[in-house]
Amino acid sequence: MSDALLRYRDRFPILGTSNYLVSNSLGAMPNEVPERLAEYARQWATRGVKAWAEGWWEMPVKVGDEIAPLLGAGAGEVAMVPTVSMAQAQVFSALKYDGRRDTIVMTEMDFPSVRYVYDQLATRLGARIVVVPSRDGVRVDEDELTAAIDERTRLVAISHVLFRSAYVVDVARVAAHAHRMGALVSLDAYHSVGIVPVDVHALGADFLSGGVLKWLCGGPGGCFLWVRPEVSSTLAPALTGWQAHRHPFAFDAEMEYADHAWRWLGGTPVVPALFAATSGPRIIREAGMSAIRAKSQRQTAYLMALADARGFDVTAPREPERRGGTIAFDVPHAREVAQALLKRDVIVDYRPGAGIRVAPHFYTTDAELEAAVAHIDDILAKGEWKRYTHEHTVVT
């Protein structure tokens, strides 16, 4: 089968040495990134503090403009921040939780780091958290989710694609109900942007955060926050910093918020991460989200067929439109098998309760999927997994 997207393979060096199937955790590095980081170093070395006035200061919004087309957002609407946890904390801090509007609705399947932010801030600031459970560890029932959103709800803070199972939540339906109830909607889109087409207006989001670390191949430290302009103009985040000031170099003691994305910035930005963050999103835009999505649906279906043929349980939705970019195989001794795969340079990761996560991206060949599953067969047949029963590794 002809695959036009494979023309991008030679732009990602790691694909020449590894079977790289973990873009759901850390996207492959584009070959332009070393030069981008070298340019940062040259500017620091030769321009020193002048570099701020020569482009560094504007980078959190200029780099946000590189992300905006992948969100269906406009120029000047996306702010780059260091982490999604910080972005979500900014959203929380901009709202009041008093009177009858004291509730935040979340789900059991949201990423723990985001849950930590809301749980801790709610405890300190008097908000109430309602968590909608998952009945099967794969999906969240949208009927139950919408039923939890009522006149007490201030904010619905949920994931677009669930990190553990790659289930695509029907956000448009949830957001429409939330707005009828007078609530706002904040999306964690870390596991959708770059592998699932995203349009913030069609989804009905009021806030959307995510990062370039995974499917956007932009590296760590580059996260983004979009706020619907008409909502942004009415809010003032308490978690803030001098870049959000309308006149930052006046060094006024009182805060006067800037407009648009600028009002959602914090302190001094993480400039090296911003230099690294642009190449991946540009390649994704060039490749085209519709082509990337079609290939992802085809390859994840192929992985499911390979798993079914072996009797492996699969933690992922069967419906293509409800499936993100990741398939989890719950193979016997999955944690140990994952370690054996890593030793063979088949790069995957493991999640308790889900299994070995395999995440093809637009640069992945079908042969690499077949090889990965063949390695699993071989590791189980030879008992190689037993070597790793006492090893513990970091999973991200």
Image: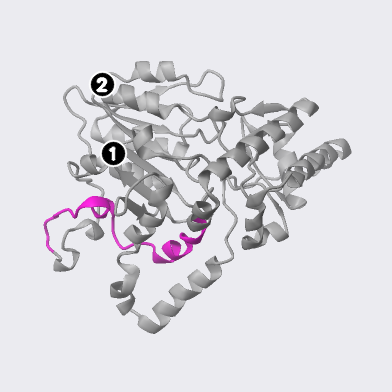
Name the secondary structure under disc 2: loop
Residue sitting at 63 percent across and 51 percent down?
Answer: 5
| Amino acid carrying mark 2 in the image | Met
**Image mark count:** 2
Q: Which mark is residue 181?
A: 2
> Is residue 129 inside the magenta stretch?
no
How far apart are the two marked residues, 1 and 2, measured between alpha carbons? 18 Å
User: Where residue 99 sits in the image (x, y, percent)?
Assistant: 16, 24
Side (left or right) of 211 relative to 311: left
Residue 128 falls in image quadrant: top left
Name the secondary structure under disc 1: helix
Q: Residue furthest bottom?
A: 46
Q: Which residue is mark 1?
A: 92
User: Where residue 201 sits in the image (x, y, percent)?
Assistant: 34, 37
Residue 125 falls in image quadrant: top left
The reply to whether residue 389 is visible in this rendering is no
User: Where residue 54 sits in the image (x, y, percent)?
Assistant: 31, 75
Q: Which region shows up in magenta?
A: 252-280
| Amino acid carrying mark 1 in the image | Phe
Q: Nearer the viewer, mark 1 or mark 2?
A: 2
> Is residue 260 inside the magenta stretch?
yes
Residue sitting at 23 percent across and 45 percent down?
Answer: 237
Q: Residue furthest right?
A: 382
Question: Colour scheme in the image?
Answer: one colour
Q: For this rendering, which residue is in front, 61 or 199?
A: 199
**Where is the C terminus found, in terms of image quarters?**
top right
